[in-house]
């Protein structure tokens, strides 16, 4: 795929960024530039100039209703290439959209955006991603209104990472919270944004600004920077600052999930949660990160599929609530940017519109209500045909005011203009190697990960280890990155390089009796057991294995590789650290910290409650040990 924009398209881009002169009579005063004639009702997104406003107004006037409706939708597409796909990917596209290729999906629905996932076969490699991005942009610019796409992914880092190595891997939001460093948060955002933009991804659905005050939260956890609202606000704002840094490194940052998803025991992918905070509690706990994000000039806010009765007693999910998305977010908080829904395929927003008699969900109605509530970009409707039809009919009937749709379209257009998407939609594939996954970038990621490792308990003085000649058994949960196991593999490679004799006996998250016995047998001929735990409260067999290993009398070092709460399930463990991530970058940092090459400097960004008394803390926010020697 050529990286060169066709001359006709390039000319169009130049025209839209210029002022349009109006013919005047010989004796008349010179006409004012068209840019100054932009109607007052046209909204202005963060960072928009008069030129950006003029572009959005001029483009809006040329768009058909069909093109406007398409502009407010973002979809996923199957395939690694815009025009050439496997039969399996073509079948998926046909089933969902009635066409075979990603480019045809974009053209058929005049889409405003596309989102990438591994499961939709979009992220097989960095060069492939860039070529896919270029192909999709060409499809968008050669059809419809000729408007380039918002291309997004969820590169939160840590547990939610869509693009793996060689792209630089950071340990995630809670690890950033553990560092307590706005510099680390800003640099992680800056590098992530620079690398995404090099791949043609111009929007990152990150950072997660939720305040994780519920240890049993099944969907947020380490995706949040922590449980202290003020600290979360600082880290969130710093990430946004890095992601949206001016120049070639800039992408749209998207803070999520408004009005706050940190205190729920329900996963909104599966059902609709309810946040029971009073208005005062919401202002104290959930609001600060979103206020900080808005102050920082965040491009987009993503909605949450949950109810907050104190903010809207109607029972509607926030995504479909005008009191929350328009009156509160825009009116009270003054957010001027683009509001994007979380995936409309999630049950948290679909359950209310499910008809058990027909076993169908009215996805068209959901799309209409999201627009009426105040959303400007609707992500991943499960039925794009029905959604398009419903929005078009609502517009024709007057139920959806033309002004509401036009405002949404203008915000999409301006956001693209502000971020340079309209003037530079095509990326240079040959430049990827000099930008993505460089040694300099990985050095920063390693430093951030080193700062995040939190030593919670070292009562037996086991750490730091002297690795040379030490027999170490690595066991427990082995995390994967883009389908490749990395947790135990990285630990073994790092420890062996330091002279240890490392054996790996992976047990998994819920080891059966035979597996537990095999690990115990392996532990007999070892000096130290390094156990990587993973959300232990959910896996009784994992807890049983840790307790059995402690009972052998061997030194056991437990590293919590996901949520840091695991120690409340086995308080008898004498040595415990939190890494907040299973990825290779974090495991490299674990190896350096436990062997003394780096000192532990992280502190707990959340409190760890007692298992038998959740109202009291086993370890408070801010707790973290240092080595005495």
Image (cartoon, grey):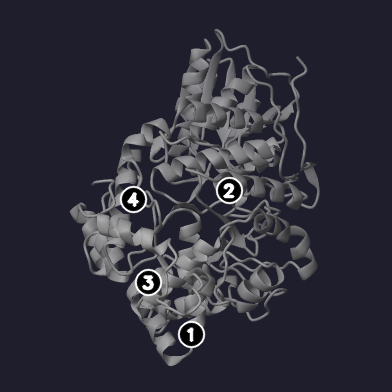
- The 10 Å Cα crowd at callout 1, few under 14, some 14 to 19, many 20 or more, is some
**Sequence-first disc among 3 and 1:** 3
Residue 477 locus on image (x, y percent): 51, 36
* Up/down of 336 relative to 176, above or below: below
- Name of the residue lying farthest toward the top: 469
Task: Give the image quarter of residue 373.
Answer: bottom right
Mark pair 1, 2: CA separation: 45 Å
- State whether residue 522 appears in this view: yes
- The 10 Å Cα crowd at callout 4, few under 14, some 14 to 19, many 20 or more, is many
Mark pair 3, 1: CA separation: 15 Å
Which residue does the numbered mark 2 point to in the structure image? 538
Which of 122/371 is in front?
371
Which one is closest to the eye, mark 2 or mark 4?
Answer: 4
Which residue does the numbered mark 1 point to in the structure image? 400
Residue 541 locus on image (x, y percent): 55, 41
Secondary structure at numbered mark 2: helix
Q: Residue at x 38, y 83 (%)?
A: 392
Q: Are marks 1 and 2 in contact (CB under 8 Å)?
A: no
Which residue does the numbered mark 3 point to in the structure image? 70
Mark pair 2, 3: CA separation: 42 Å
Q: Are marks 2 and 4 in contact (CB under 8 Å)?
A: no
Which one is closest to the eye, mark 1 or mark 2?
Answer: 1
Residue 180 locus on image (x, y percent): 71, 38
> What label does residue 133 carry, if any?
4
């Amino acid at each position: 795929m050529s990286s060169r924009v066709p001359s006709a398209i390039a000319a169009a881009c130049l025209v839209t960024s210029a002022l349009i002169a109006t013919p005047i009579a010989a004796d008349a005063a010179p006409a004012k530039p068209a840019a100054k004639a932009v109607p007052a009702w046209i909204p202005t997104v963060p960072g928009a100039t008069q030129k950006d406003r003029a572009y959005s107004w001029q483009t809006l006037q040329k768009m058909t209703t069909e093109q406007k409706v398409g502009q407010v939708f973002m979809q996923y597409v199957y395939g690694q290439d815009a025009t050439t796909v496997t039969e399996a990917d073509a079948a998926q596209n046909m089933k969902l959209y009635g066409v075979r290729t990603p480019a045809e999906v974009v053209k058929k629905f005049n889409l405003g955006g596309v989102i990438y996932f591994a499961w939709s076969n979009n992220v097989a490699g960095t060069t492939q991603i860039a070529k896919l991005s270029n192909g999709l942009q060409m499809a968008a610019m050669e059809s419809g209104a000729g408007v380039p796409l918002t291309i997004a992914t969820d590169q939160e880092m840590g547990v939610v990472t869509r693009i793996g190595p060689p792209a630089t891997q950071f340990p995630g939001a809670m690890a950033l919270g553990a560092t307590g460093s706005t510099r680390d948060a800003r640099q992680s955002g800056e590098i992530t944004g620079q690398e995404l933009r090099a791949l043609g991804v111009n929007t990152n659905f990150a950072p997660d600004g939720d305040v994780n005050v519920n240890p049993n939260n099944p969907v947020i956890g380490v995706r949040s920077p922590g449980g202290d609202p003020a600290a979360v606000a600082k880290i969130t704002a710093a990430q946004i600052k890095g992601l949206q840094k001016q120049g070639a490194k800039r992408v749209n940052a998207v803070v999520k999930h408004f009005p706050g998803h940190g205190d729920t025991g329900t996963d909104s992918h599966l059902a609709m949660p309810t946040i029971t905070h009073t208005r005062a509690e919401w202002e104290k706990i959930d609001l600060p990160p979103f206020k900080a994000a808005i102050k920082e000039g965040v491009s987009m806010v993503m909605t949450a599929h949950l109810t907050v009765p104190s903010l809207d007693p109607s029972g509607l999910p926030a995504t479909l609530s005008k009191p929350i998305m328009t009156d509160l977010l825009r009116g009270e908080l003054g957010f001027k940017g683009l509001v994007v829904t979380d995936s409309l395929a999630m049950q948290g927003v679909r359950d209310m519109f499910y008809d058990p008699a027909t076993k169908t969900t009215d996805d068209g109605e959901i799309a209409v209500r999201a627009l009426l509530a105040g959303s400007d970009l609707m992500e991943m409707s499960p039925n794009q045909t029905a959604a398009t039809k419903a929005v078009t009919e609502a517009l024709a009937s007057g139920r959806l005011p033309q002004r509401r749709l036009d405002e949404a379209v203008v915000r999409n257009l301006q956001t693209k203009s502000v971020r340079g998407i309209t003037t530079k939609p095509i990326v240079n594939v040959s430049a990827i190697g000099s930008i993505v996954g460089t040694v300099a970038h990985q050095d920063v990621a390693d430093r951030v990960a080193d700062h995040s490792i939190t030593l919670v308990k070292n009562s037996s003085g086991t750490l730091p280890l002297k690795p040379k000649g030490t027999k170490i058994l690595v066991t427990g949960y082995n995390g994967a990155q883009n389908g490749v196991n990395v947790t135990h593999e990285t630990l073994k490679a790092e420890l062996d390089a330091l002279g240890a004799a490392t054996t790996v006996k992976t047990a998994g998250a819920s080891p059966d009796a035979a597996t537990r016995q095999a690990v115990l047998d392996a532990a007999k001929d070892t000096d130290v057991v390094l156990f990587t735990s993973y959300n232990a409260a959910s896996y009784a067999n994992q807890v049983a294995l840790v307790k059995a290993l402690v009972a052998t009398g061997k030194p056991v070092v437990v590293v919590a590789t996901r949520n840091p709460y695991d120690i409340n399930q086995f308080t008898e463990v004498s040595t415990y650290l939190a890494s907040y991530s299973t990825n290779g970058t974090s495991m490299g940092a674990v190896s350096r910290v436990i062997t003394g090459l780096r000192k532990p400097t992280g502190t707990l960004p959340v409190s760890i409650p007692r298992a038998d008394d959740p109202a009291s803390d086993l370890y408070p926010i801010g707790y973290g040990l240092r080595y005495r020697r």
